[in-house]
């Protein structure tokens, strides 16, 4: 099992980014994939999850609801996190996780 996050970077407030979580060793279509983030000097925060076999279901933390959208592509075996209207408080290292497996993360910095 391997998870690799990508797509992070520097973005201005109000901007958008799309993070990718590329999975190997299992199907993203039949497992719960969670997104977490860790702001500098703060603890890890759960922000989203995507799951479902016959259908796709998503949940979001209140801090990102209506701004972030999780999706998945079974053909590419990738889970995405589309982030819009980014704020300085969204600055963090973002991780995806399946069970006890977590990637190395991707840095998102929101700054003017």
Image (tube, rainbow, N blue to C red):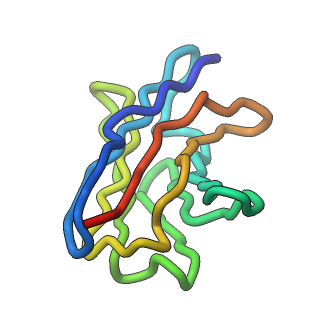
Q: Quadrant of the N terminus?
A: top right
Which residue is depicted at the point 50% across and 48% down? 53
Which residue is depicted at the point 60% across and 28% down? 104
Residue 55's quadrant in the figure? bottom left
Q: Position of residue 26 (x, y in %)?
A: 56, 22
Considering only vertical position in the picture, is 16 above or below 20? below
Which is more toward the observer, 108 or 63? 108
Which is more toward the observer, 1 or 64? 64
Considering only vertical position in the picture, is 5 above or below 46? above
Which residue is depicted at the point 46% across and 76% down? 64
Residue 19's quadrant in the figure? top left
Q: Position of residue 97 (x, y in %)?
A: 64, 40
Q: Position of residue 33 (x, y in %)?
A: 57, 46
Considering only vertical position in the picture, is 21 above or below 3? below
Residue 85's quadrant in the figure? bottom left
Which is more toward the observer, 75 or 63? 63
Q: Position of residue 90 (x, y in %)?
A: 46, 67
Which residue is depicted at the point 55% across and 25% down? 3
Considering only vertical position in the picture, is 52 above or below 110? above
Judge left or right: residue 111 versus residue 88.
Answer: left
Judge left or right: residue 56 versus residue 96.
Answer: left
């Amino acid at each position: 099992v391997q998870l690799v996050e990508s797509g992070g970077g520097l973005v201005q407030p109000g901007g958008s980014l799309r993070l990718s979580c590329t999975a190997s060793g299992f199907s993203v279509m039949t497992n719960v994939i969670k997104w977490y983030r860790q702001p500098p000097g703060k603890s890890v925060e759960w922000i989203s999850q995507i799951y479902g076999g016959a259908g796709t279901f998503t949940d979001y933390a209140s801090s990102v609801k209506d701004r972030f959208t999780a999706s998945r592509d079974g053909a590419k075996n990738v889970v995405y996190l589309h982030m819009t209207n980014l704020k300085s408080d969204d600055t963090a290292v973002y991780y995806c996780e399946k069970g006890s497996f977590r990637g190395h993360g991707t840095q998102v910095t929101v700054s003017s």
